[in-house]
Image (tube, grey):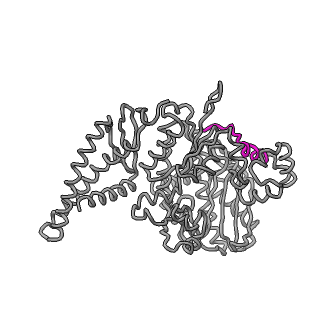
Amino acid sequence: MSTGREREKVIFLADCQSFYASVEKAEHPGYENKPVAVAGSVERRSGIILAACPIAKSFGIGTADRLGEALNKCPELVVMRPRMQHYIDVSLMITKIYEEFTDLVEVFSIDEQFLDVSASLHLFGDPITMAKQIQQKVLSQTGVRVRVGISSNKILAKIATDIWAKKNKEGIFTLPPTEVETLLWPQPVNKMFGVGSKMTAHFSLLGMHTIGDIARTPLPRLKEKFRARFGKQSDIQAEVMWRTANGLDDSPVTPRTFDTPPKSVGHMMTLPRDYIEPWEVETILLELTEEVCRDCRRKGYMGAVVSVSCMCSPYEAPTGFSRQMKMLDPTNHTNTVFEAVKMLFYKFWNRLPVRRIGITLSQLKDDEEYQLTLFEDQIKARALDKATDLIKNRYGSAAIVRASSLTSAGQAGDRALKIGGHYK
Amino acid sequence: MMSAATNPMIETEEDIQMIKEYTLFPILLDMLARDMEELMMYKNKIVYHHVLGYLKEVEHSIYPELRKLKAKMRARNITILNTEMNALGIDIEYKVRGYVHRFTMLRGLVKAELMTMLMNVQGRVR
């Protein structure tokens, strides 16, 4: 892909096919020709399909389907419990394989990575040969099939994967920027990256049905249309859509993306049943506060703003709130944050049964510089937090918990077995 | 620009397959040896005696395969530099036509591949 004086970049977006399901199938050869899905448990209200293998997908099963629905579509479906830590290990291993081909690898998600191969391409031949080699190596070491979209920037590589590489037999597709107009623009709007069902409906009302309709609209005109529909704050969104439709993306492939300091630290939990009693909800609030503060302490931050989000039942017509407040001083001390959390929660809770709850600390700052106060023994409180953290780090998160976590409302023990709400 | 067939740096599908088999065969032999040793305790029982005999046949059928594989690897200028077992799985450093590469397999997949390999060997023995 060289053009004249300046050599164009060659970017890959490598995507693992049905990642969790492929890992499970590779490790259970007996299920090779059977429909396999990885799903949470119905009892704990996380019974959705997290990944379905291509055979299961041929029965119409898709990601995020409810488990019951999926079993209705395919009664012989083999349902496996997720092993999140294992998938993370496999994902890290795949990233290491990519790093044998280029040092510029950016993790985009657990099953997608960007590779900038511009500088190492000459060692491996052409982009297709290199992509095939990557596919072979990942397949033989993990049993996972990788699809590769190739182009000159990240957004086009992502589009090449999503629209074409995922659908063709080879699992490889090259989308040169010169062919954006002929290949990408005739595609319907809903195939564009970043456009879901709601945005498709908005574009439809704006009279835009293909990606080309967005791309051909002058940016100032598109911004006007967005402002009329979404309000004054929509200029950035309009520009993102316009640039995506035109295949414009200047962002470099950045290794260690996740090493950048976080803007907030938060945890959320869907409860296994509706919680009605205040003491039950408080138990969860304390557990979540403990997790958030422990994360902050591990990363060396204190938060100045605490947010509480709450979703109440019923699932079909949920109500709830998401509110935040600034605390007196930035802190990562569990008990101090918990007092603020309780104050915020009771101010807005309308006593409806609680289904999901989350806590976040934001406006983070370095925890070395904390405000001294005469009214509490901060040194003692920090030492206590430090001691419990050390115990948890060494023996696991459930090794030491608050007494309330041992009641019927407590979830700390179960959460210690999970990552992102799914079993490790 | 060199093609996959002429570029010595590029590993072919067969190269990778050979490395994989070369890594797994010794683990399979170890596994069989350990199981046979355990069965030796019961060799006076007729059924166990038969199983033991069968496993020995399987073991013997692996050696010629391994020899063939070694010869093929020599012909292709493939050398294993280092094999390391760790908590996650197995890590191999090897050289293909002068270029160093790595191959890693997690424990779960090693076990699954061994089972498949054993089934294939059993098929040949029968």
**Nearer-the-camera pick, A400 or A216:** A216
**Number of numbered discs overlaid on the protein picture:** 0
**Nearer-the-camera pick, A133 or B49:** A133
Q: Is residue B125 left or right of residue A151?
A: left
Which quadrant would the N terminus of chain A be assigned to in this image?
A: top right
Quarter holding residue A60: bottom right
Q: Which residue lies furthest to the left in this view?
A: B44
Span highlighted in magenta in the image: A237-253
Q: In this view, does A372 lie to the left or right of A34?
A: right
Q: Which residue is drawn at 22% across and 58% down?
A: B58
**Nearer-the-camera pick, A47 or A172:** A172
Q: Which residue lies furthest to the top in this view?
A: A5
Q: Is residue A352 left or right of residue A71?
A: right
Q: In the rendered image of this protein, does residue A43 appear above or below residue A413?
A: below
Q: Which residue is drawn at 75% across and 45% down?
A: A240
Please indicate, yes or no, whether residue B112 appears anywhere in the rendered image: yes
**Nearer-the-camera pick, A97 or A401:** A97
Residue A137 image position (x, y, % from top left): 44, 45
Residue B120 image position (x, y, % from top left): 30, 58
Q: In the rendered image of this protein, does residue B44 appear above or below residue A216?
A: below
Residue A366 image position (x, y, % from top left): 64, 43
Q: Is residue B22 magenta?
A: no
Q: Residue at x 37, y 44 (%)?
A: B14
Residue A40 image position (x, y, % from top left): 54, 66
Q: Which residue is drawn at 14% across and 71% down?
A: B46
Q: Does the magenta stretch include residue A251?
A: yes
Please indicate, yes or no, whether residue A96 appears anywhere in the rendered image: no
Q: In the rendered image of this protein, does residue A80 appear above or below residue A238?
A: below
